Image (spheres, rainbow, N blue to C red):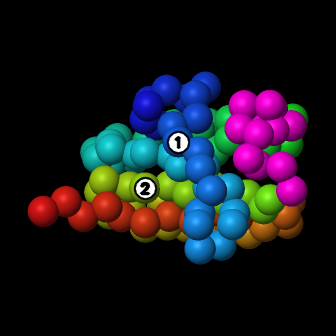
Amino acid sequence: MTIENPKTIDSIGVDKKTGKVVLKIFDHLDWNNEHEHLLLLQTKINTYLSFIESGEVYTAYENSKNREFVISVDFAEKPVSNAVKFMDNSARIIAEAGYELEYSVDTYP
């Protein structure tokens, strides 16, 4: 699964260090079409939030009960400045809802 499949959860599991449920988004796209890329990212994050807030997460992944949630975006390419602003703003809004949003850039050898 990837960011191009907006209605699916790419990956879900429990972080053994923190005990939090981590829902991963795999973003393999480049930033040539920044606007479209940001729209895909926004749609995917909203899908994840709906998955959590609706309680569907508890049915789909029973190990998520009584745990905190982290939405984690793995970018294949370094985000452009507008994407960083979007992620930072989104992280603040998502934190107000009681969840976390984080991101990283995967570096492949």
Asked which quadrant contains residue 17, the reply is bottom right
Q: What type of secondary structure mainly makes up the magenta span? A: helix
Question: Is residue 46 in view?
Answer: no
Work out which quarter of the rendered image holds the C terminus and state it: bottom left
Residue 37 % position (x, y): 44, 42
Pointer 2: residues within 10 angstroms few (<14), some, or many (20+)?
some
Q: Is residue 23 above or below residue 6?
A: below
Could you tell me how far apart the alpha carbons at marks 1 and 2 are, in whole angstroms? 11 Å
For the residue pair 83 and 70, the one nearer the viewer reads as: 70
Which residue is denoted by mark 1 in the rendering? 11
Residue 99 % position (x, y): 77, 61
Residue 34 % position (x, y): 40, 47
- For numbered disc 2, what is the local secondary structure? strand
Residue 46 % position (x, y): 69, 40
Question: Is residue 11 in view?
Answer: yes
Residue at left 85%, top 42%? 53
Which residue is denoted by mark 2 in the rendering? 74
Asked which quadrant contains residue 45, the reply is top right
Amino acid type at circle 2 is Asp
Residue that protrudes farthest toward the bottom in the picture: 17
Which region is colored magenta? 55-66
